[in-house]
Image: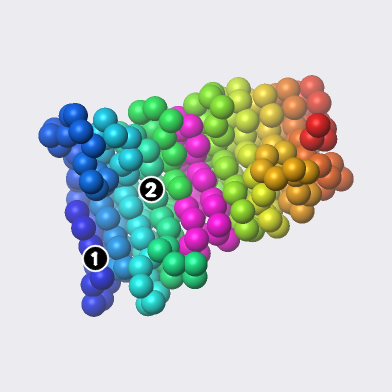
């Protein structure tokens, strides 16, 4: 379903979009397969379900939200289910350097079932991500080139080389989230500017928080404090370990270490 450059907000509720039997089996299509697509439009998506947005080309999304043109747009996605996609469950970005899209994602379920998918990929926008469940993803919530506030979500990884959280560039704030790393890494910071990781709980990890990715030497401006890390091998690893001292560790082999 496409909502594009509308004169006013368009609200969608109680809608199911099933991409099964889309007829794409061999060559890749020119366009992505998307369940619901807002481009340069505002509105509320409530109690919607998207599923089976998959092709052999692996460039599809359940919900695609794009800030477009000089005007500002506001979109809310709430109480919805997104599953059966092969790249992004919910993808949001702006087509220009200035973010024109303000997004609220609240109380949604995003569950991964296909390959190395990302639950929520959010870039160059503003807004909040709160009280969502994101599970079994290569990357659960990816925040890039943006200043999103991400609070009170439950995010579980798939135990691979990804992570429930990937914070890339700029200064996102992540607070009060519950993170199951599934035996792998809980959160990865990569050149994440002044990002704040505070009052989160990370379970079942080989490394709870990694601040060693990106440029070399890795930046040390992240704030990692007030978190609780339970049942894992390594707690926090970053250049400036003093930023990570005020955290609580239980059943953790090494609380704090530096990048090598």
In the picture shown, does residue 242 fall above or below 98?
A: above
Q: Is residue 227 visible?
A: no
Q: Which-is-in-front pick, marks 1 and 2?
A: 1
Q: Is residue 22 left or right of residue 136?
A: left
How would you rate the neighbour count of disc 2 (Cα within 10 Å): few for under 14, some for 14-19, many for 20 or more? many
Which residue in the protein does label 1 denote? 4
* Number of numbered discs on residues: 2
The answer to if 127 sits in the magenta stretch is yes
Q: Quadrant of the N terminus?
A: bottom left
Q: Quadrant of the C terminus?
A: top right
Secondary structure that dominates the magenta span: strand
Q: CA distance from mark 1 to mark 2?
A: 17 Å
Question: Considering only order in the chain, which callout, 2 or 1, is on the residue closer to the N terminus?
Answer: 1
Q: Residue at x 50, y 37 (%)?
A: 139
* The magenta segment: 122-151
Element carrying mark 1: strand
Residue 201 placement (x, y as % from top left): 65, 39
The correct choice, above or below, for 125 with respect to 121 in the image is: below
Q: Percent position (x, y) of residue 216?
A: 75, 43
Q: Kindly identify the residue that appears in the image at 21 percent across and 41 percent down.
A: 29
33 sits to left or right of 188: left
Q: Secondary structure at mark 2?
A: strand
At 53% from the left edge and 24% from the top edge, which residue is drawn? 160
On the rendered structure, is 212 left or right of 109? right
The answer to which image quadrant residue 100 occupies is: bottom left
Q: Which residue does the numbered mark 2 point to in the structure image?
A: 90
Residue 13 in sight here: yes
The spot of residue 94 in percent (x, y) is 42, 63
Query: Which residue is found at the position 68% from the left and 39% from the top?
Result: 213
């Amino acid at each position: 379903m496409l909502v594009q450059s509308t004169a006013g907000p368009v609200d969608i509720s109680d809608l199911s979009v099933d991409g099964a039997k889309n007829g794409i089996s061999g060559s890749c299509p020119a366009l992505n397969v998307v369940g619901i697509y807002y481009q340069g439009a505002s509105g509320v998506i409530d109690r919607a379900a998207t599923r089976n947005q998959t092709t052999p080309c692996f460039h599809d999304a359940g919900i695609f939200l794009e800030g477009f043109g000089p005007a500002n747009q506001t979109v809310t996605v709430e109480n919805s289910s997104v599953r059966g996609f092969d790249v992004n469950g919910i993808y949001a970005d702006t087509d220009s350097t200035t973010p024109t899209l303000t997004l609220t994602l609240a109380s949604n379920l995003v569950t991964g079932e296909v390959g190395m998918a990302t639950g929520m990929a959010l870039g160059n926008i503003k807004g909040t991500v709160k009280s969502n469940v994101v599970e079994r993803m290569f990357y659960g919530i990816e925040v890039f080139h943006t200043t999103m506030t991400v609070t009170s979500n439950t995010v579980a990884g798939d135990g691979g080389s990804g992570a429930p959280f990937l914070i890339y560039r700029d200064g996102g704030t992540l607070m009060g989230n519950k993170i199951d790393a599934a035996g792998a890494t809980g959160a990865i910071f990569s050149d994440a500017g002044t990002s704040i990781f505070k009052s989160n709980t990370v379970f079942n990890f080989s490394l709870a928080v990694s601040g060693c990715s990106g440029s070399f030497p890795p930046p040390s401006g992240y704030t990692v404090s007030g978190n609780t890390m339970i049942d894992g091998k390594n707690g926090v690893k970053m250049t400036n370990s003093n930023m990570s001292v005020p955290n609580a560790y239980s059943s953790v082999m090494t609380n704090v270490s530096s990048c090598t």
